[in-house]
Image (cartoon, grey):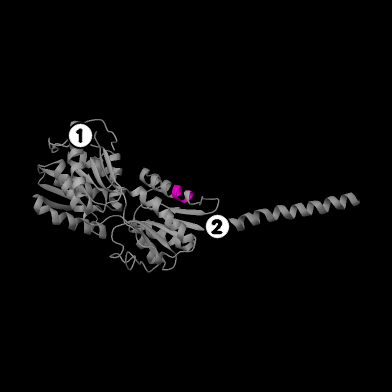
Amino acid sequence: MQFTRLKRREFITLLGGATAWPLAARAQQAAMPVIGMLMSTAADDPEGKARFAAFLGGLQQLGWTDGVNARIEVRWPRGDAEAHQYAAELVALAPNVILATGVYAGRLLQETQTVPIVFVLVNDPVGAGFVASLARPGGNATGFLFTEYGIGGKWLELLKELAPAVTRAAVLRDATDPAGIGQWGAIQSVAPSRGVELTPIGVRNAGEIERGVAEFARSPNSGLIVTSGGPVIVHRERIIATAATHRLPTVYWNRMYPAGGGLVSYGPETIDQYRRAAAYIDRILKGEKPADLPVQAPTKYELVINLRPPRPSALTCPRRYSPAPTRSSSETPPVHHAARRRNDLAARGARAAARGNASRRVS
């Protein structure tokens, strides 16, 4: 009997410990800081995967691991309607901080004025009302600039280097996005001096893009510029295919387009911003406030040339340049500080593209 009672007491003790263990584990999990993420691509998008991996890698270097000492809640909206829905979902989770891509930071700021927000790839956070100033954001948001609007003029200059015969250029841009408006304005300011007539094309859906480009491409000496924005990411495969179908020399804003078969891109390295954002997330989790963290500018710009695209009929290249890198990154320049080097690289790389050389990375 004594043995039986002893075993029973031991069993009850063990049972109580077994019951307490999952409760303690759940309490520990609940105590983990929660990091929200509002992306701008689909979950299966290669660019989105690369951005997410870069962010996770940056966090791990700073000692944060998903499921170990932090919990990451990520949402992948397919368009603006889902972005509104997911912004509300993330805020309802009461996270410690949220990372937002581009204009979707604005959706979050409509939902909360208290949850810290770190944004990436935003063109004009002051003009958009995200922050009071770049040096002193002053609210619950801070982050990383995509680039200045003046880069739009560089895209037109690059197009003329690639295809000197171009006298007409269509510009795919989101007329509702401040970035699309600003970049369009920068392109307009350069066009007269380059002898180029401009035609804006909307990007609300794939049909609008295809119809606009097809109609524009009926006239000769035509080229295409694709500015930044969410819709041109969602429809990028269709845009690349449409440009190839109509044999239009095309300049894109990001390397994901040459990687997908487009001709050439020039702009900030977007993946790098997600790595850098991890450092701001870390500082906020350790007690710093977004209001005190200045908005940072891009540190890496890259020229990417696809040396094996379907060759546009209008593509000719200056003979005075020697073959040059498929890809060139400048580590620290604002756009206006490296114009001469970028123009040289563009024209030299274009000649390599025209020759159809194998793709290669050069210092």
Measuring 71% from the left and 52% from the top, which residue is drawn there? 18
Q: Which residues make up the magenta segment?
A: 56-60
User: In the depicted view, which residue is nearer to us: 358 or 312?
Assistant: 358
Residue 57, x across and y down, in percent:
45, 47
- What x and y, as percent, mark residue 82? 38, 56
| Label 2 neighbour load within 10 Å: few <14, some 14-19, many 20+ | some
Q: Is residue 10 visible?
A: yes
Element type at mark 1: loop
The residue where tag 2 is placed is 32
Near-viewer residue (108 or 133): 133
User: Is residue 33 within the magenta segment?
Assistant: no
Q: Who's the residue at 43% across and 63% down the image?
A: 116
Please name the predominant secondary structure of the magenta segment in the image: helix
In the rendered image, the residue lying farthest to the right is 1
Q: State the image coordinates of residue 251 (x, y, percent, origin top left).
A: 21, 45
Query: In the image, what residue occupies the spot 21% across and 42% down?
Result: 345
Residue 208: numbered disc: none
Kind of residue indicated by mark 2? Met
At a point 40% along the width and 59% down the height, the residue shown is 118
Q: Earlier in the sequence, mark 2 or mark 1?
A: 2
Instruction: Name the kind of residue labelled 1 in the image.
Output: Pro
Q: Which residue is mark 1?
A: 323
| Residue 202 visible somewhere in the drawing | no
| Cα distance between the residues tagged 2 and 1 | 53 Å
